[in-house]
Each structure stands twice: as C-alpha cells, then as structure tokens.
C-alpha cells in the first residue's frame, strides 16, 4: 500500500484509510456484527492500511472501543485518528450538539484515550466547527493537550477556508477532513489551494458519497437511515435522481476500465491534488479487499477525461 505524507508532519499515512463511522453501528448505520467488523479491521492491517479514523460520536463510543481493542496488538504500527467537539446526551441523532470548549475537549480526550486503549492519539481533530466557542479557545486547548503528549498532531474537519484561516492564528494543524468525491467537489475552488499553500493535508471522507457511487442504488431507493435527514450529501429528490444518472455513466466507464464503479470513484479522489488519504467505510473483509484495489493505478486518459466531463464541478 502506498503511503503519503500528511501535511506538514511526520505522519506517513496509507493512501486508503479505514473510516470507522460505519462500524460504530446504530443510530447511524447497520453492521454485520462486531465479529465482521473486527475481521475487516484486521484485514485492513494485513493489506497495508495504517490509518484508522474514528470519532466518539460514531456509535456513541462503540467505534473507538472496537478499534482500540482490535488494534492494540499492532498499536505501534498504525496511526489512530479521532475527534472532539460533538457531544450527545442520549442515543439519538437529535441529541448531538457541537461543543468545542476547553471543558468539553478536556473531558473528551480522556474518554477517547480510554476507549482507544492507548496513551496518545496520533491525529486529533475538531469534528465540526463550533461557532459559539472562539477558535482561540479551541485551538489553544488542543495545543495544551498536545504539549502533555496525549495527542501528536492537531487537525480540523468540515472547516471552511475562513474558519481555517482563523484557527491557524492560534495553533498549528496539519490536516483538514472534508467531504470529497465526484459528486461533491466544492473544496477545489479555494480550500484545496489554501491547504496546499499552508502544509495542510487532505483526509477525504465519503469518497463513495455514502455508497451512492458504488452503483448499488437507483432512483427508486428510499433511505431510512441518517441519509434521509438532509444532514450532508444528496439522497432524495431531483438532485439525487440526476446523480444516479451520472452514476450509471460511472458504471459504464468503470466497466470499460475493468474496475467497479466504487474503485474508479475512490481512485479519482486519490489522484486529486492535496489528498493524502481517502477514508473508506466497510462492513466486512470483502469490502475492504475491493476498496484497497482502488489504489495504485490510473485509468486510460480518455476514461479520465470522460469522468471529469460527467462529474464536472458545478
């Protein structure tokens, strides 16, 4: 597995990263059970993946616990990434709130370290910007925790360019984790150039647009999980139907390249400027094997040109 330097840091991350949202299970996703999740994590290690991304809110602690337990025997060989700034009061989607205050982060880091069964987190990110807490308070808290050796590097997730500029005044962060895929390319205009100019590596989440780019859904699909809530992504209405039309063309292009639609979609993300790693969520060993095969090759120029035409940034 190819590794890439993550921003201006000493972290060398695998081009394919393991996204831990899915294995957290309810209330966001369904899984095939913890045994299947553990096997997928171990298979990822065997296939050369060294970057494992999670967050406390993924399954309300369950994703961190699964990764911590499973990766403990190989802890020194992997890079653990987790987040702060989202809190919950009960196991329900509506109970999640943003809180990146000093008090909250100092509580969250201790809980994450315990669940991950480790004494340090390699990359610790603010999950979503908290507009009610000054960036100075958030970043200075993270810098203090970093000085104590509990985290190695600081990152941000879902930040706008203005929020990154403000945050950079108070502490050094090495990565941005944005949604980035063929159907979501808004970061290309300003965010990517700023990251390239400032030593900030891009950790792309949802390279498959939460499954849409795998080609397994059609216009009749009606999602019953978080995808029906209108939080991120487009999973209903006319815009969703237009996206399915594009995915049908993606499937044809992938077939001509001897690949699956998902592999071609992930491969595209990996070839974009500034991207250090693309996070893939999986339910079982078979899926991790398929996704790993998205790295290490490039489609023929004519396929790539057609791909960029079909999915041109709007």
Image (cartoon, grey):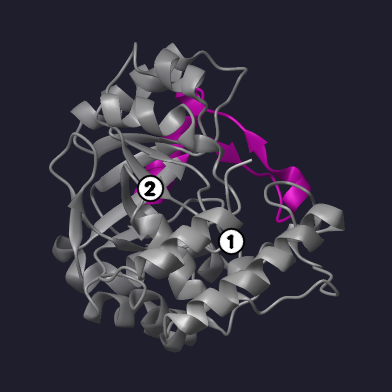
Residue beneath the point at 34% across and 61% down: 52
* Residue 205 position (above or below residue 198): below
Q: Position of residue 130 (x, y in %)?
A: 58, 25
Q: Quadrant of residue 251?
A: bottom right
Pointer 2 residue: 203
219 or 107: nearer the viewer: 219
How many marks the image carries: the answer is 2
25 or 196: nearer the viewer: 196
Residue beneath the point at 47% across and 37% down: 188
Q: Position of residue 132 (x, y in %)?
A: 62, 17
Residue 59 badge? 1
Region in magenta: 84-113
Residue beneath the point at 47% across and 82% down: 256
Q: In which quarter of the image is residue 109?
A: top left
Q: Position of residue 163 (x, y in %)?
A: 49, 20
Residue 101 located within the stretch drawn in magenta: yes
Residue 236 badge? none
User: Which marked residue is nearer to the observer: mark 1 or mark 2?
Assistant: 2
187 or 247: nearer the viewer: 247
């Amino acid at each position: 597995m190819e590794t890439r330097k993550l921003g201006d840091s000493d972290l060398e991350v695998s081009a394919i990263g393991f996204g831990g949202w899915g294995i957290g299970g309810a209330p966001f996703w369904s899984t095939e059970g913890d045994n299947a999740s553990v096997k997928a994590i171990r298979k990822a290690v065997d296939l050369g993946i060294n970057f494992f991304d999670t967050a406390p809110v993924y399954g309300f602690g369950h994703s961190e616990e699964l990764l911590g337990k499973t990766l403990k025997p190989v802890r020194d060989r992997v890079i653990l990434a987790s987040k702060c700034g989202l809190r919950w009061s009960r196991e329900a989607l509506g109970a999640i709130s943003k809180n990146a205050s000093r008090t909250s982060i100092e509580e969250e880091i201790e809980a994450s370290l315990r669940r991950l069964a480790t004494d340090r987190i390699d990359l610790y990110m603010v999950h979503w910007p908290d507009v009610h807490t000054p960036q100075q308070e958030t970043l200075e808290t993270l810098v203090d925790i970093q000085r104590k050796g509990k985290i190695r590097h600081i990152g941000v997730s879902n930040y706008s360019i203005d929020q990154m500029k403000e945050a950079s005044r108070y502490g050094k962060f090495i990565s941005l984790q944005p949604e980035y895929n063929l159907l979501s390319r808004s970061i290309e205009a300003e965010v990517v150039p700023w990251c390239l100019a400032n030593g900030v590596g891009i950790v792309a989440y949802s390279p498959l647009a939460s499954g849409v780019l795998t080609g397994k859904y059609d216009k009749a699909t009606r999602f019953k999980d978080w995808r029906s809530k209108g939080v991120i992504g487009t999973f209903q209405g006319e815009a969703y139907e237009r996206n399915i039309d594009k995915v049908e063309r993606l499937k044809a292009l992938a077939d001509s390249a001897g690949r699956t639609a998902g592999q071609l979609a992930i491969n595209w993300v990996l070839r974009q400027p500034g991207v250090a790693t693309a996070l893939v969520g999986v339910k079982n060993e078979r899926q991790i094997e398929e996704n790993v095969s998205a790295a290490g090759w490039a489609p023929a120029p004519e396929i790539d040109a057609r791909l960029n035409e079909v999915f041109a940034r709007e």
